[in-house]
Image (spheres, rainbow, N blue to C red):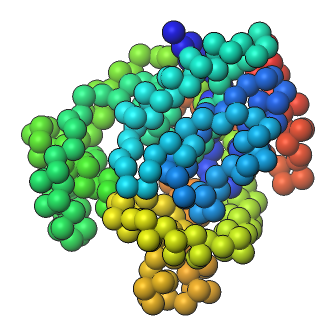
Amino acid sequence: MANPSRSIFIAGPTAAGKSEIALALAEKIGGEIISVDSMQVYRGLDIGTAKPDAAARKRIPHHLIDVCDLAGPFDAAKFVQLANKAVAEIESRKRIPRARAIFCGGTGLYFKAFLEGIGEAPPADATLRAELEAAPLAQLLAELRERDPAAHDAIDQQNPRRVVRALEVIRLTGKPFSVQRAAWNLQPATCNMLTLFTRSAADLRRRIDARVDEMFRRGLVEETRELLKHGLAENQTAMQAIGYRQVVEHLRGERTLAQTIELVKIRTRQFAKRQLTWYRRHGNCQWIELQPEETVEEVVGRLPQFFV
């Protein structure tokens, strides 16, 4: 049986540098990395998700990357299932006595699902979901505000997929979505604390802008154009990935490339802010602010609790 209590959990906003830290840490302790990213699970979504490249994956084994076709569904329940399997595999290899699974990513919901359980929310209803997806977002938000003010205030109101899911659960169960989320198994998962790496607002903005520029330089537009041939536009989850959605709109003629690049930077900064807000609410994080001049090796060197 897997022993999650031995695992390490590295979280943080996009572009904070957590992936590089996890990679160096894995080399230091002989660990393997489990990606906690709701978009890196999809094959083909490479540049826009900052997926670890072949060299990084050769250096250290990575799990839960490229495990789902673009047309396939993926959710928190599937993540928990595959993550538990990965932890068991890592521990069974016992590469060295201290070997651990290193969870690393920015999808807070997946961390929560793994550590606290996924609750009893009903499965998707295809007919109801199609009806909700056909309605204007403003109408959906109005219904959510009326039926569950707490969920309305807490949800990402720019993400139609999450709004649809909340209303789907409310209609199917007759209960507020916020109450069902709160009823997740909140028993502590043995010392499973997230180590959250963050940066100053100015430093994080600089890194986000540089990352976005690099993604477009590497061919994000071309990658998106190719993904459209394989069903990207039909996958409501994948279309929420920042970068791809804006590039699709650019390819449809809605804005220039320069405007698209700037919009992706803005949306990424907004996303990073929402990630930090989520982790503040999580309540079981140790926060470490990284400095611009600090090397990855220096960061790992001041984390002795990981090496005992």
In percent of the image, x 40 and y 34: which residue is there? 78
178 displayed left or right of 263:
left
Residue 263 image offset from top left, x and y in percent = 55, 77
Residue 192 image offset from top left, x and y in percent = 57, 21
Q: Nearer the viewer, residue 252 or 228?
A: 228
- In which quadrant of the rendered view does residue 236 lie? bottom left
Residue 31 image offset from top left, x and y in percent = 73, 25
Q: Nearer the viewer, residue 194 or 19?
A: 19
Q: Is residue 299 above or below residue 233?
A: above
- In which quadrant of the rendered view does residue 142 lie? bottom left
In percent of the image, x 41 and y 16: which residue is there? 187
Answer yes or no: is residue 190 visible: no
167 displayed left or right of 234:
left
In percent of the image, x 43 and y 55: which residue is there? 70
Q: Nearer the viewer, residue 55 or 184?
A: 55
Q: Which quadrant holds the C terminus?
A: top right
135 displayed left or right of 185:
left
Q: Is residue 215 above or below residue 14?
A: below
Residue 62 image offset from top left, x and y in percent = 66, 36
Answer yes or no: is residue 174 visible: yes
In percent of the image, x 89 and y 38: which residue is there? 297
How many marks overall? 0
Q: Is residue 35 above or below residue 273?
A: above
